[in-house]
Amino acid sequence: MRSYGALMNPFDKYETQNIALKGDLSILSVIHQPDEFPHRESQINTMVASLSGLIRGFSANNLLIYGKTGTGKTSVTRYVTGMLEEKIGDRVATCYVNCQTYDSPYSILVNLSKCIPGSSTIPPSGWTLDRIYDELVIKIRESGKILILVLDEIDKLVEKNGGDSLYVILKLMGEDTGAGGTIIGITNDSSFYERLDPRVKSRMSRESVMFSPYNAEELKDILYPRVTKVLNTESYEEAAISLCAAIGAREHGDARKAIDLMRISIEMAIRESSDRVSVNHVYKARDTLEIDVIRETVKTQPTHSKIVLLSVILSGERHPNSATTGEVSSLYADLCRDIGIQPLTSRRVSDYISELEDFGMINTTVKSLGRYGRTRYIKITGRENDIKRFILEDPELEPLKDIRGTRQFRLDENI
Ligand SMILES: Nc1ncnc2c1ncn2[C@@H]1O[C@H](COP(=O)(O)OP(=O)(O)OP(=O)(O)O)[C@@H](O)[C@H]1O
Ligand SMILES: [Mg+2]
């Protein structure tokens, strides 16, 4: 048997745990569907009132739900539709589709068919949209069910396929087919409705529900019932919960962030054999979360975007606070040549710079130079060493791994 010095087995040190969990840690994970929603009473009431006709055999209006990420839109909708099913049982069939994953009318209708009991399966491809449509009209009528179609991230469907795609679904669920059903659309995009064409608009929404961002006090009220199901009071500092809530509130009132932070903090405290979860664990958890998000964002960028980002970092090393678009573009072209790929046009580089700004990786400021035009200055928003490390994890960029920001650049170029 191999020996590990004083330890017989490297896992030994994790065997003892000072924090006793009284509930499953998954209560603080995304898979957990809570049965209470502090500070969402008014949204739940509005949704229930809007759907209430269904329990008396009438139809209900379509609903649009708005709100920033982590404000409870999906989980509250699942809760409300679950309660409706509990109330009227088999008379209702709820079909939940995430339009980020199923982003064509075809795939949405295929999903809808799966939710209608007794409906023959529509193949994942091969039928015309008209054929699926006609089949579904018959099946919905035959089933006699009240259908609720939840289209989560509904904006992604319209973004990818245009308003017509939504029109087909609205028509199917609308009165003129005699099939009937209610659509609940969920979106982060507050201008979604305004951008729909009038034909779709008039069918889509007669009611909307706004999920406002949570403030720190509200997030504390959300965290407490979940944390106290997992931990005894002596196992956490009150301040740790307050800090998770404060960080979640700063991130546009995001309950997911606050809950994730708390779970990771508990996992860290357990791993460190600490007696209780402290604010220090929360700070470390925040760093871990942030770094994971940055790594994922960098990893999913196209190669040219990674090279542009690397050029911003290297230019910043040479000109702190004052790298210009010209310097970045010129370094980008050099780096492309170093690894043997064709640089893109400056217009495309400029597009990548704007995208990286949207991702929050870089900041740009435009300064007027009077009659010499305007210059755009570019700066990385932080964590440049980590970002550089993640960029260079791309095997295609391997030849750049020893590069430093010490090249000579051409001086200011106008944009
Ligand atoms: N009022 C609340 N009470 C309890 N838990 C909540 C509340 N609001 C949100 N949550 C929890 O926060 C997490 C995020 O909520 P949810 O997924 O519903 O957000 P969302 O608005 O759909 O976000 P996104 O736009 O990113 O999809 C979930 O784990 C959910 O259970
Ligand atoms: Mg959601």
Image (cartoon, grey):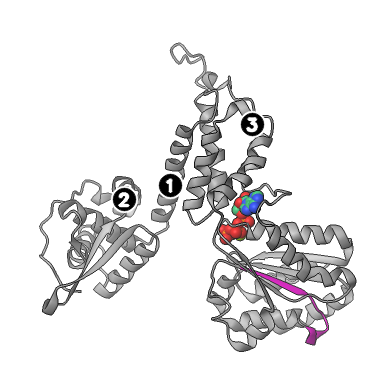
Q: Quadrant of ligand 2?
A: bottom right
* Residue at the far top in the pictured view: 6
Identify the mark at residue 231; answer none if there is no mark.
3
Q: Earlier in the sequence, mark 3 or mark 1?
A: 3
Q: CA distance from mark 2 to mark 1?
A: 11 Å
Question: Mark 2 vs ligand 1: CB under 8 Å?
Answer: no
- Amino acid tagged 3: Leu
* Quarter holding residue 221: top right
Q: For mark 2, give the secondary structure.
A: loop
User: Badge 1, how many Cα within 10 Å: few under 14, some, many 20+?
Assistant: few
In magenta stretch: residue 182: yes
Confirm or deny contact between disc 2 and disc 1 (CB under 8 A). no
Q: State the extent of the magenta-drawn residues as a range.
A: 175-186
Instruction: Name the residue that disc number 1 marks.
Output: 290
> Relative to residue 28, is residue 236 depicted above or below?
above
Pick the quarter of the image with the C terminus.
Answer: bottom left
In magenta stretch: residue 146: no
Foreground residue among 371 and 412: 371
Give the percent coordinates (x, y) of residue 303.
34, 60
Q: Earlier in the sequence, mark 3 or mark 2?
A: 3
* Residue at the far front in the pictured view: 217
- Amino acid tagged 2: Gly
Q: CA distance from mark 3 to mark 2?
A: 35 Å
> Relative to residue 307, is residue 231 depicted above or below?
above
Q: For mark 1, give the secondary structure.
A: helix
**On the rendered structure, is 152 left or right of 53?**
left
Q: Earlier in the sequence, mark 2 or mark 1?
A: 1
Instruction: Name the residue that disc number 2 marks.
Output: 382
Q: CA distance from mark 3 to mark 1?
A: 25 Å
Foreground residue among 349 and 188: 188
